Amino acid sequence: GYSTEELVGMHIRELMAPGSQKQEIGSYLEQLARKQPAPTPYLAQNLTKDGQVIDIEVNWNYRFDGEEQVVGFVCILSDITERKKAERKLLDYQSQLKSLTHQLTLAEQQEKRHIAELLHDDLGQCLAFCKMKMQIALASVSEAAVANELESACETLTQSMDHIKNLTYDLRSPILKE
């Protein structure tokens, strides 16, 4: 980089990166000297001595003469290139995390739909078939004790079918379909 001796007296325009507003900086500095707003740090890109573009933070203040007239500016330039790289990397990670979260939510919804279909199509139909067979057996049984057991089993199957219907609805609720 530049030595302190090289930087003292150097115009900021000489350090500005290509694409910066080099032409406008002179009139902007004149306006600052005239209006004298409170100094506020700003971020920019500058060139290093070997021509590399770096991100910098500029803290500045006015330089006054003995009569309190602004005769220049004093600036402290801090290389924040690594910080900016870390910030960009963090933003990339946040974007990736958001994308992965979205993908995970979609996968979860698809899996819930798949489980609901299995419950309804396979288990629900199997229980319905068992209930029909039990009802046929119940109609042909004359012994009261066996008929009571078959009736109890049919009620249990009905409850199980209702439970599966509710689970299927919960897994495939209208909110998930949107």
Image (cartoon, helix red, strand yellow):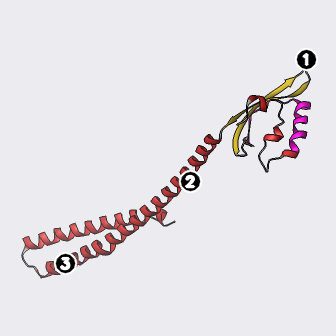
Image position of 113 with respect to 10: above or below = below
User: Callout 1, which amino acid?
Assistant: Gly
Q: How far apart in space, not on screen, are marks 2 and 3 (Cα)?
A: 58 Å
Q: Quadrant of residue 82?
A: top right
Q: Is residue 124 left or right of residue 2?
A: left
Residue 147 picture location, percent across and down: 11, 73
In terms of secondary structure, where does tag 3 sit? helix
Q: Of the residues tagged 1 and 2, which is closer to the observer?
A: 1
Provide the residue designation for mark 3: 135
Q: Earlier in the sequence, mark 1 or mark 2?
A: 1
Q: Is residue 120 left or right of residue 24?
A: left
Q: Earlier in the sequence, mark 3 or mark 1?
A: 1
Q: Is-magenta flag for residue 42?
A: yes
Q: Nearer the viewer, residue 14 or 99?
A: 14
Span highlighted in magenta in the image: 24-45
User: Callout 3, which amino acid?
Assistant: Gln
Question: Which residue sits at x=70%, y=39%?
Answer: 56
Residue 98 picture location, percent across and down: 53, 54
Q: Is residue 23 left or right of residue 156?
A: right
Q: Quadrant of residue 154?
A: bottom left
Q: How far apart in space, not on screen, are marks 1 and 2 (Cα)?
A: 54 Å
Q: Quadrant of residue 16?
A: top right
Q: Of the residues tagged 3 and 1, which is closer to the observer?
A: 1
Q: Earlier in the sequence, mark 2 or mark 3?
A: 2
Image quadrant where one finds the N terminus:
top right
Provide the residue designation for mark 2: 95
In terms of secondary structure, where does tag 1 sit? loop
Provide the residue designation for mark 1: 66
Q: Is-magenta flag for residue 151?
A: no
Residue 78 picture location, percent across and down: 69, 34
Q: Nearer the viewer, residue 160 or 58?
A: 58
Residue 41 picture location, percent across and down: 74, 34
